[in-house]
Amino acid sequence: MGEFDLEKTASVKPASSSDSSNMVDSDATRLAEMGYTQDLNRNFSILSLVGIAFCMSNSWFGISASMITGISSGGTVLIIYGLLWITIVSMAVGSSLAELASAMPNAGGQYFWAHELAPRKWARFASYLTGWFGYAGAIFACSSVVLGLAQGCVGMWKLGHPDFEIEAWHIVATYQVINFWCYLFNCWGKTLPWVAKMTLYISLASYFIILVTVPACARPHASAEFVFGHFSNQTGWKSDGMAFIVGLINPNWIFACLDSATHLAEEVPQPEKNIPIAIMATVAIGAVTSWTYCVSMFFGIKDLSTLVSSTTGVPILELYYQALNNKAGAIVLETLLIVTGMGCQIACHTWQSRLCWAFARDRGLPGHQWLSQVNKTLDVPLVAHSVSCFIVGALGLLYLGSSTAFNSMMTACISLLYVSYAIPVVCLWYQGRDKIQHGPFWLGKLGAAANIMTILWTIFCIVMYSFPSSMPATTSNMNYVSVVYFVVVVIMLADWFIRGHRSFKSEEKGELEVKMDDSE
């Protein structure tokens, strides 16, 4: 196949807005130059793309699930200022991904970029590692989201029925129902853009309703000194700095899935422009909504210790109850949060299924001959979607054995995803940022600084998020993230030596010709 050359502006000039069919044909031609066929229709507009990318992270929903837990590692200071720091990091990570997505828009995302930019000798293995880390991170992220939804639903029942005793199987049963319900929304491709827009509107509407209701009903309000200056170290770590660092995982979780839009590159027109817009918009909207939401919620706190030890197991639900002093009202607000979270889970399923499908068409996964199929009638990779959701469901059963081990997957998803981002960034530096031809989104020296921060933050996450969140460490509170890493690496290497080293990308696709300076 012919080689794929990227120009410093878009390699294929966008067609005029009055001729959308020509624009789609141009996108398909560009994809063909990479060696792939147009298997999925380009149903997504920029609004629906932003919708699904934002709903994937849904930052204000995500921070609801981890806000009170994070407070024990640094008080409100951790959340308020930790979110600001994570926003800066996420801008850097998002910029790095956006540059690469603009230069090489492909549903494979980071594993495709790694293959194109890594040294030829190591390109297949670097790409394979990236694909596996990214897919494992996506599966773990989906599992953690649906767990939060299940806990919220069971917690609402507990609030309305004080004599009810929550058991692990209640959470797992609810987990399976929610996972299957959200699975159905990704079974018909043509409705996904509409669902994405609706979930975006629902998320923003729910955000505004809760943002106003909680502080309006809370009497008395917490003081500004508490909201912006309360530091509390209840972790058992002697160092407050260490407590703050291990607690950063809570605000970090909501921005860990920034690659989601890149895997829809073959379902949106002009992806070299629209994917970067979606990524950066996700960070911007997520930062504003999550930070203002936290400030608003903190003003509604009356008794912090009651939140942490709530019998519902859902601190944010207890916060709503404290503010409104009304169980029905608290359940209504939690319902808005759950519906928003459902949109997040639907977007998660879209993300993981597209990554699975793209990776499988390059023979990156066992059973690739089925996982790479697209149901033309439904316009979705139905097998990849179904298998991915089945894995998420199976992982939910781990909660029956150990909630601590299950929660370690949330930590693992952050580090694994960042590693999948960092590998192509490192490969980009190997080639030389100024020696490759790029797309319309390119930040020059600012982009170089963003790349450096992405790499350094990845190293930080791997090391620091492996420490226990509280001390002294016991079997019940130990951070088992290292075990999760080990299992993922063992499965990945076993597949590589048994099958992958022969079949992965065995039929070469069109490759990016990295144009070097004449001096080279």
Image (spheres, helix red, strand yellow):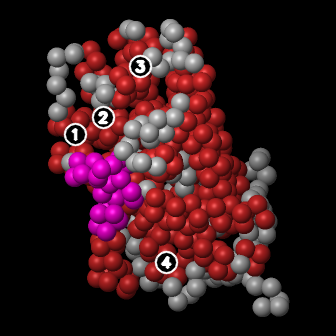
Q: CA distance from mark 2 to mark 4?
A: 36 Å
Q: Earlier in the sequence, mark 4 or mark 1?
A: 4
Is 361 colored magenta in this rendering?
A: no
Q: Which mark is residue 150?
A: 2
- Choose mark 2 or mark 3, whichever is in front: 3
Give percent across and percent down for residue 86.
Answer: 59, 47
Q: Earlier in the sequence, mark 2 or mark 3?
A: 2
Name the residue tied to disc 1: 172
506 and 72: which is toward the camera: 72
- Near mark 1 (Cα within 10 A), the count class, few <14, some 14-19 or many ≥20, is many
- Near mark 4 (Cα within 10 A), the count class, few <14, some 14-19 or many ≥20, is many
In the image, the segment drawn in magenta is 466-487
Q: CA distance from mark 3 to mark 1?
A: 30 Å
Q: CA distance from mark 1 to mark 2?
A: 7 Å
Dividing the picture into quarters, in which one does residue 155 lie?
A: top left
Secondary structure category for the residue under label 3: loop
Q: Which mark is residue 303?
A: 3
Residue extending farthest to the front is: 238
Secondary structure category for the residue under label 2: helix
Q: CA distance from mark 2 to mark 3?
A: 25 Å
Classify the position of the N terminus by image quarter: bottom right
Residue drawn 31% across the image and 68% down it: 486
Q: Amino acid at mark 4?
A: Ala
Give percent across and percent down for residue 49.
Answer: 59, 45
